Image (cartoon, rainbow, N blue to C red):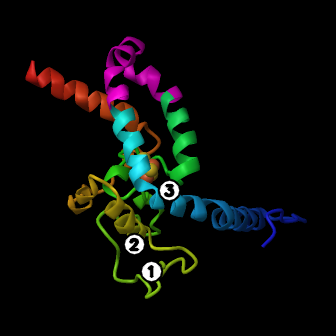
Amino acid sequence: MPLTLKVKNLTDSGVDNYLHRRDAVVKERYMYPVRHWVVRHARFFERIYRTFEPVIVKLQPLWKSIGYQRAEKPVSVVEKFSKELLFDCKMCGQCILSSTGMSCPMNCPKSLRNGPCGGVQQNGNCEVNPEMRCVWVEAWEGSQKMKGGAQIHVVQLPVDHSLKGSSSWLRVARNASDTQQEHE
Ligand code: SF4
């Protein structure tokens, strides 16, 4: 399907349909292969995450001096840009990629955070979007490549939609800071 779709005399619903089709084409052409590639290299991305997480936490004095609220906007812009490119991130604000084989569970059409539904097809594709591999089949495969892959067995809390759009990175730093203070 061509990436450039011609738009003629579009009504509002026509524009919606156009945007929907355009997004679907971009996903099929670009995002699905990238997501699949990331999962195949989950161990590599796990290493990056394990290196990056302590840095974010160590930068606590900086976040504190700027103020977490003021840091939120620029940090979430950077986070969104980088994670959207690699993981098709939806900025749920409570990232669990390191527990899901680097496959973002928010790309599941049902937003399931604790494993697949009963509709996974025999070829491992999604019942809602048959062109797409099930996010959780990918998650399982990715987790098998990771050192901390057993994390996939941890039961996740339901999504807190009030956190949508916020930075998971800053949340990690803030939680680490709170834990540190509790122990002082
Ligand atoms: S789990 Fe949330 S923050 Fe992490 S990649 Fe998916 S949508 Fe983004």
Please identify, in this view, whether the residue under mark 3 or under mark 2 is nearer the observer.
Answer: 3
| Residue 177 placement, left or right of 48 | left
The x and y percentages for residue 158 are 28, 57
Q: CA distance from mark 2 to mark 1?
A: 6 Å
Question: Is 9 drawn above or below residue 79 in the view shown?
Answer: below
Q: Which residue is mark 1?
A: 124
Mark number displayed over residue 137: 2
In the image, what residue type sits under mark 3?
Answer: Val
| Residue 10 placement, left or right of 76 | right
| Nearest the eye: 16 or 75 | 75
Q: CA distance from mark 3 to mark 1?
A: 17 Å
Please give the name of the residue rendered at 58% of the width and 48% of the height, measured from the top-left corner: 85
The x and y percentages for residue 74 are 53, 27
Q: Which residues are magenta?
A: 54-74
Q: Are marks 3 and 1 in contact (CB under 8 Å)?
A: no
Mark number displayed over residue 88: none
Q: Which residue is mark 3?
A: 38
SS at mark 2 in the image: helix
Q: Is residue 113 magenta?
A: no
Question: Is 73 drawn above or below residue 105 in the view shown?
Answer: above
In the image, what residue type sits under mark 2?
Answer: Val
Q: Is residue 64 magenta?
A: yes
